[in-house]
Amino acid sequence: DEENAGNTKKQIAKLFEASLKATVPNELDIEPLVAASTAKFGDYQCNNAMSIWPRIKGKGTEYRGPPAVGQAIMKNLPPSEMIESCSVAGPGFVNVVLSKDWIAKKVQKMLIDGIGTWAPTLPIKRAVVDFSSPNIAKEMHVGHLRSTIIGDTLARMLEFSNVEVLRRNHVGDWGTQFGMLIEFLFEKFPDWEDAKETAIGDLQEFYKASKKRFDADPVFKERAQQAVVRLQGGEPVYRKAWAQICDISRREFDKVYQRLGIQLEEKGESFYNPYIPGVLEALSKQGLVEESQGARVIFIEGFNIPLIVVKSDGGYNYASTDLTALWYRLNEEKAEWVIYVTDVGQQQHFEMFFSAAKRAGWLPADDKTYPKTSHVGFGLVLGEDGKRFRTRDSEVVRLVDLLDEAKFRSKSAILGRDKAADWTEEEVEQIAEALGYGAVKYADLKNNRLTNYTFNYDQMLNDKGNTAVYLLYAHARICSIIRKSGKDIEELKKTGEIVLVHPVERALALHLLQFSETVEDSCTNLLPNVLCEYLYNLSENFNTFYISCKVVGNEEETSRLLLCEATAIVMRKCFDLLGIVPVYKI
Ligand code: ARG
């Protein structure tokens, strides 16, 4: 069946679905429970027998206990070229051994039709991924780096699955801090409007200085608060000053995005501002918005504080904007899945306005049907000392410096190798970037995102162990095996045949076949570490294969070169989905 062409698990599940219908025809809607198996009796396992038994016993069933149900499930499997053999184990697990020929053929088919045929199929057309989202004039810190890296990967996995992704940078460009910044700009640089280059220079320093002024002088403070009102009222000079300040920040953010190859479309908080009154009005009409201690709030079951949508001073806040942005994304942009990537510290904020959206009927009450929202939370980045990550002598980490340092270190490592001698300057630069930035990304993505992770250059740039450097080198090594064979691999794809002779060849090919279901898992559960683990295991499987199986000069050379090529293709797709640039030589 074409729809699950790449998804081996779903293809097996389809067979079990048919078998379950035949085995227990009176039990409707039994979902096949199929999982890849690590047991030695099979490649996949169906676990339905144990849960079916209690449903049918006492209803005059012919079966005697779960193992008998398992036997029947096995016997009722429709004949399929996928399956080599089946068995029932223990309390009724049905184990399936896939056919070696079928595995080989599927890998071969991918080589011809392309890895795109192994893309997952998701039941949606359009999604919003809201990620990175730093705040103007404030530092873009390592938390934003995590959001950028994780969000980009999720967007890439969705895009690969043929979902149109609106990559949204929800920058904080509308806070009350702008009043203070604008007034400080007027005061400090009276001719700010005429200057070609902005005089502000370092925006973070400027922020600090203006904050100091704000805290010290009540008259200035008063002016700053007025400035917010005038800015929000749309007064041209204030808008212009605001735009100039935003631009400086934007240029800083772009340096990070450019290094990491991140595509993003900015729709900052300010964008949604004009829509807020209308949305709140509609919610009020539904009776959702109530008065509480001078503020306007939405009460939400399960929380002891309400969601404030209009502050007691009449101003809007983070929640009013987010609620409105969600309305816009669902109604104007027709997104079916809206995904937000921030630190876990913001979880409650998201849970609250998601609940409000459910109360308003924008979203179904369960989290399974679309349209739906997901908050992708992540933990802290820690330094060697186990505390929040900082660079040695400043309280903040400049992300650009952090990335440059990773590149610098990998460049030194490359130049320390003999091989680099005949590389061009440009090649060294490219490879240093691929390794350095790839290392930073992979170190972040390989952990379950909810755990804190320790930032350590030596660890992430190590060429052994579960690191990007190790994986990129492993890929380059495979490419070099193929190159050194002197064979035209494109030609071999058409004329050659994969034959899985050795058990380790079979294990490698089977792992390749599990790519699609893994990406689908990783994507639908919003867990990039699942894909990282797959990639690492792939390279381990390849190593085992390469140790036991001579490739070049062996009588199975063609088949083995094709396995090398398939491994390289799948590794490259994994890199691509993780936002890592592959390396072809080492
Ligand atoms: N600007 C926020 C911060 O730096 C993140 C925004 C996340 N997106 C959202 N729609 N709330 O913490």
Image: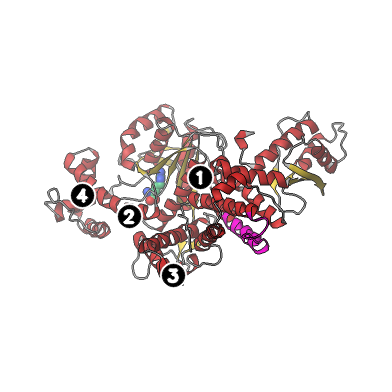
Q: CA distance from mark 4 to mark 3?
A: 46 Å
Q: Residue 430: x percent and y percent? A: 40, 59
Inspect the image, locate mark 1, and give the three-letter code of the amino acid beneath it: Met
Circle 2 residue: 255
Is residue 540 within the magenta segment?
A: yes
Tag 4 residue: 182
- Looking at the picture, tell me which residue is in the foreground, 53 or 561: 561
Separation (CA) of disc 1 from disc 2: 24 Å
Residue where numbered disc 3 is placed? 413
Q: Earlier in the sequence, mark 2 or mark 4?
A: 4
In contact (CB < 8 Å): disc 2 and disc 3? no
Q: Earlier in the sequence, mark 1 or mark 4?
A: 1
**Residue at left offset 45%, top offset 72%:** 418
Give the magenta-colored segment's residue range.
535-557
Residue 328 rendering spot, x and y as whole percentages: 39, 33
Q: Nearer the viewer, mark 4 or mark 3?
A: 3
Amino acid type indicated by mark 4 = Ile
Q: Amino acid at mark 2?
A: Lys
Q: CA distance from mark 2 to mark 4?
A: 24 Å
Q: Is residue 536 above or below residue 116?
A: below
- The answer to whether residue 103 is above or below residue 61 is below
* Whether residue 73 is situated above or below residue 104 in the rendered picture: above
Q: Is residue 119 visible?
A: no
Does the numbered disc 3 mark a residue whose Cβ is under 8 Å from ligand 1? no
Q: Name the N-terminal-most of marks 3 and 1.
A: 1
Left/right of residue 280 with respect to residue 519 in the rendered view: left
Q: Secondary structure at mark 2?
A: helix
